[in-house]
Amino acid sequence: MELKIKAGAEKLREVATDRKALSDVATIVKKANSKLNELQAELQQLESQIILTQGQPQSPQQNHSNGQGTT
C-alpha cells in the first residue's frame, strides 16, 4: 500500500506547479518513505527471529507425531 502511495505522490510531483502542492507531495513522499523504512526494519527483525528459531533443536514432544513414544 505504501509503495502505491509513494508512486502516486511521485507522479503528482511531476505535474504539480505551485509550491503548496509540491510541499504537500513532498510530505506524502516523506511519510511513505518513513513507513516503508519501518516496515523493512520489522521484516528484518522477523527474519532474524525465524533464523534463530530454525537453528534451535526441537523438543522431544515435537518429534512425535501424536505425542506418544514408540514402544
Image (cartoon, rainbow, N blue to C red):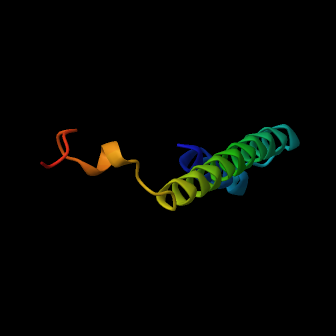
Furthest residue to the right?
19
Left or right of 32 on screen, residue 26: right
Left or right of 54 on screen, residue 32: right
Rendering coords of residue 54 (x, y %): 47, 59
Front residue of this view, candidates 48 and 57: 57
Q: Would you identify the image quadrant in which residue 35 lies?
A: top right
Front residue of this view, candidates 28 and 43: 43
Left or right of 68 on screen, residue 17: right
Rendering coords of residue 6 (x, y %): 64, 49
Residue at 85% of width from left, 37% of height from top?
A: 20
Q: Would you identify the image quadrant in which residue 14 lies?
A: bottom right
Q: Number of callouts in the render?
A: 0
Rendering coords of residue 1 (x, y %): 52, 43
Residue at 32% of width from left, 42% of height from top?
A: 61
Front residue of this view, candidates 64 and 1: 64
Residue at 58% of width from left, 51% of height from top?
A: 49
Residue at 23% of width from left, 47% of height from top?
A: 64
